[in-house]
């Protein structure tokens, strides 16, 4: 397939530094008081170990008591989830694309630490989907890999992110995507089902295949990411349920490619096909520094997460050794059913942690190389 060119997307607007001194006065007094109270809550809680608390120092706090110019997002919108959930690992969300510029003194530091190795002066490389055929099948014997899921997120330019979407904007995004998705062709063509009127049989099939998203967890709830549920939300799927798009879950658009067995190359090629068609029809929010813009700073850059469920009965007998090996391979090992789940029957979920600082192709290839090494170690351990 060769390199697939990405559209030249609009860079985040730069903020006029001359307006900085006026920001605090432009914020409503009630909101200013809530921001101050939130900061005090973080400072006083001795058990809070979030990146938010670590990096929202008094000096940084003074620099980010601002608001974005287009949608009026304040620091409260950014940090409210982490303040209400003091056990958060990260604790911040971006209410609009401009937040990554306006609240940069805080967000840059959190992003740099979470995406280890992406420094305060780094820039994400240009989009490069590469040649999916080079990824190939991870398990031609069919002994180890059970299934593969690759997903990525996109935000539509011209809308705020989830925390600030109005009821009309949720519906507007859904309407726009309904029209766009109806124009997809080939293997990724399919049908769109709004959550509000989804047929029972479709709901059953999607639930059975773990392809139906639910209302957000307490972290999303606190970030105001679940308002007007389920209005404006829905699922698009091709006939085989191997290509799925979620509309207005956490981000405006979340694209998934699913494959039974170990053919990561096929799953990735399908994802690239769908994304390329979408990018011809929709302009997505993009930053020259952070790549594709997302509601959560943990998903920036390529936004690509390639997850592989595989059976490693020998390696899982030595949890510490397996974790050390995964760290060396720059992978994250999760439980059988994902985050915060135990390993059952020697089955683990392996995925990439990094989405910033490397291309889409390199991100997926990193998973492919790592899984092949895990399989090799399993065979000879």
Image (spheres, rainbow, N blue to C red):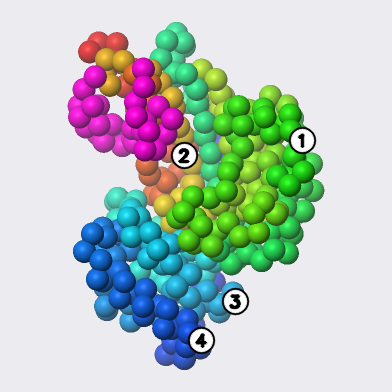
Label placed on residue 305:
2
Q: Earlier in the sequence, mark 4 or mark 3?
A: 4
Crowdedness of circle 1 by 10 Å Cα count: few (<14), some, many (20+)? few
Q: Earlier in the sequence, mark 4 or mark 1?
A: 4
What kind of element bears circle 3?
loop
Q: Quadrant of residue 33?
A: bottom left
Magenta residues span 317-345
Instruction: Look at the image and say whether residue 94 sits in the magenta stretch.
Output: no
Q: Earlier in the sequence, mark 4 or mark 2?
A: 4
Q: Which residue is mark 1?
A: 199
Task: Please name the residue shown 26% across and 71% down the image.
Answer: 43
The x, y position of residue 38, in whole percent, is 37, 73
Q: Earlier in the sequence, mark 3 or mark 1?
A: 3
Gap between marks 4 and 3, in whole Å?
Answer: 16 Å
Label placed on residue 223:
none
Gap between marks 2 and 1, in whole Å?
Answer: 29 Å
Task: Please name the residue shown 49% across and 79% down the image.
Answer: 67
Q: Earlier in the sequence, mark 3 or mark 2?
A: 3
Quick one: quadrant of the N terminus? top right
Task: Please state which of the two labelled residues, at mark 4 or mark 2, is closer to the viewer.
Answer: 4
The x, y position of residue 358, in whole percent, is 41, 45
Closest to the observer, 320 or 264: 320
The x, y position of residue 105, in whole percent, is 35, 71
């Amino acid at each position: 397939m060769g390199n697939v060119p990405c559209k030249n997307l609009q860079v985040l607007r730069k903020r006029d530094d001359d307006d900085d001194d006026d920001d605090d006065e432009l914020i409503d007094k009630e909101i200013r008081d809530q921001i101050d109270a939130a900061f005090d809550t973080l400072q006083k809680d001795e058990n809070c170990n979030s990146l938010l608390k670590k990096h929202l120092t008094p000096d940084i706090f003074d620099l980010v008591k601002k608001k974005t110019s287009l949608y009026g997002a304040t620091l409260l919108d950014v940090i409210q989830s982490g303040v209400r959930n003091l056990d958060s690992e990260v604790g911040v969300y971006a209410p609009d694309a401009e937040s990554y510029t306006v609240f940069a003194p805080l967000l840059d530091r959190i992003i740099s630490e979470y995406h280890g190795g992406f420094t305060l002066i780094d820039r994400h490389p240009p989009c490069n989907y590469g040649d999916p055929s080079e990824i190939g099948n991870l398990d031609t014997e069919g002994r180890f890999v059970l299934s593969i899921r690759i997903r990525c997120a996109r935000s539509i330019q011209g809308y705020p992110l989830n925390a600030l979407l109005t009821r009309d904007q949720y519906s507007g995004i859904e309407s726009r995507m309904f029209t766009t998705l109806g124009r997809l062709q080939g293997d990724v063509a399919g049908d769109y089902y709004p959550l509000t009127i989804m047929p029972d049989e479709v709901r059953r099939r999607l639930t059975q295949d773990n392809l139906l998203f639910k209302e957000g967890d307490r972290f999303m709830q606190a970030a105001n990411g679940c308002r007007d549920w389920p209005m404006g939300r829905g699922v698009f799927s091709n006939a085989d349920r191997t290509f799925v798009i979620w509309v207005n879950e956490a981000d405006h658009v979340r694209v998934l490619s699913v494959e039974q067995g170990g053919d990561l190359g096929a799953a990735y090629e399908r994802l690239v096909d769908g994304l390329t068609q979408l990018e011809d029809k929709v302009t997505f929010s993009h930053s020259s520094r952070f790549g594709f813009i997302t509601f959560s700073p943990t998903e920036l850059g390529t936004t690509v997460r390639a997850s592989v469920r595989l059976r490693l009965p020998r390696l899982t007998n030595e949890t510490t050794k397996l974790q050390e090996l995964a760290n060396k391979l720059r992978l994250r090992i999760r439980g059988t059913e994902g985050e915060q789940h135990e390993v059952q029957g020697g089955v683990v979920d392996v995925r990439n942690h990094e989405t910033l600082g490397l291309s889409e192709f390199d991100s997926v290839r990193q998973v492919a190389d790592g899984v092949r090494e895990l399989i090799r170690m399993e065979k000879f351990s």
